[in-house]
Image (cartoon, rainbow, N blue to C red):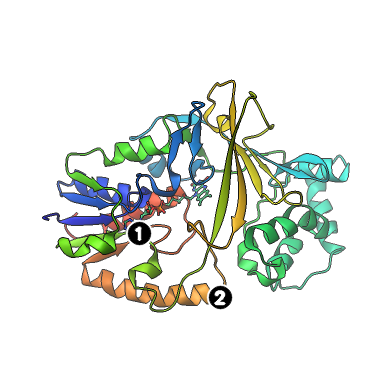
Amino acid sequence: MNYKYIIVGAGLAGAVSARTLAEKGHKVMVIERSDHIAGHCHDYKNDAGITTHTYGPHIFHTKNKEIWNWVKQYADFIYFQHRVLSYANGQLLPFPINRDTISQLFGVELTINEVEEFLKHEVEISTFNEPPKNFRDAVVAQVGETLYTTFFENYTKKQWERDPSELSAELAKRIPVRTNRDDRYFADQYQGIPSKGYTSMVGEMLNHENISIMLNTDYFKVKDSFSPSMTIYTGELDAFFDYQFGKLEYRSLRLEFKTLDTKEYQQAAVVNYPNDYDWTRITEFKKLSGEKSDKTTLCFEFPKATGEPYYIVPDEKNTEMRKKYMELVENLEKEGKFLFIGRLAEYTYYNMDQVIEAALNKIASIDCV
Ligand SMILES: Cc1cc2nc3c(=O)[nH]c(=O)nc-3n(C[C@H](O)[C@H](O)[C@H](O)COP(=O)(O)OP(=O)(O)OC[C@H]3O[C@@H](n4cnc5c(N)ncnc54)[C@H](O)[C@@H]3O)c2cc1C
């Protein structure tokens, strides 16, 4: 079949690449293994009329105005500022940690200046390695042992099935701690939820006369039927190279969806459970979309080691293995026949805006574009 560009994957990386090439007049074939477009940001309206995120809650947020303007060509966005509560010590506390979290947890009233002093004191009375050797040390060095134990220790054990002292300090590099009362989860200037959902948004990107799509098709099974000038690959990095250096590790999730005959279940779209129960968090979807219904749909997340690839595991072994695969990628990209873009193909923790940016930049780097 005669397509100049083959794109493997109809997630955001694939859709952004396809759209950019199609607008330049190129014929593009998108091959998608699953039965739907939009990859990990796929959503659908369930029987109760509530937009449900298939792979867990997705909130679009970016600091980058260009990306915000680009994405708004394909969707109207509902104004949404993400706020998360964390159920700890029998209370619902704002998270990430801010002045109110500290006030409620410790039962103290503090000014902004006093918060800094308070945290400094918490750190001083704590025990940890300096410089931090691992995740535990890195968190304790920022907030002290009490806040670490309340919010991070057990959550991390549930999420990673490892003791925080075995995880890299890098993971805790950017723990947002606010001395003011800003209780938004993301501080990015542009935030929102596509009013018709992410699947519709990605569908709009792919809706172009130069774009064809094959669903339910594994690239590796059909690749010999095509002879494109270039293949843009957004699937798993190790799979492309037939796992020659080994299997890159991912954390996965078991998601349990429940629809209840009640208008409201919890006080925020997402409530974290660092210490109680086996789930890490519960999402109430209508609080993301603002949809009205007499019912409500919830998603309970249970971390697990195998299954759908959700989160990369950036430990030493995987980082080394990724490096070897990326050397092969670099060589292939230099030859000009392949590009590797996205969360799976680059084995990188990308948010949606970062995937869009990476795809726009990489496609712009192709000579003919
Ligand atoms: C639980 C969770 C919550 C998240 N929350 C947020 C959030 O709130 N905000 C945010 O910005 N980001 C969030 N993200 C990240 C976001 O999902 C990703 O950044 C984005 O979806 C990645 O897009 P992608 O195209 O790189 O990869 P994917 O969406 O994974 O797309 C890759 C596609 O390639 C297909 N594919 C793979 N191999 C083959 C093959 N051999 N043949 C054919 N097709 C193939 C796959 O089926 C898939 O559809 C979250 C991610 C997870 C897992």
Question: Considering the image in quadrants, where does the C terminus appear?
Answer: bottom left
Q: Which one is nearer the viewer's eye here, 355 or 364?
A: 355
Q: Position of residue 135 (x, y in %)?
A: 68, 66
Q: Give the label on residue 316, or none.
A: 2
Q: Position of residue 208 (x, y in %)?
A: 21, 39
Who's the residue at 58% across and 44% down the image?
A: 256
Residue 194 is left or right of residue 108, and the answer is left
Label 2 environment density (alpha carbons within 10 Å; few <14, some 14–19, many ≥20): few
Who's the residue at 82% across and 42% down the image?
A: 90
Label 1 residue near ligand 1, CB within 8 Å: yes
Q: Position of residue 260 (x, y in %)?
A: 62, 29
Residue underneath mark 1: 341
Q: Is residue 130 above or below residue 105?
A: below
State whether residue 2 appears in this view: yes
**Residue 295 found in image quarter:** top right
Q: Are marks 2 and 1 in contact (CB under 8 Å)?
A: no
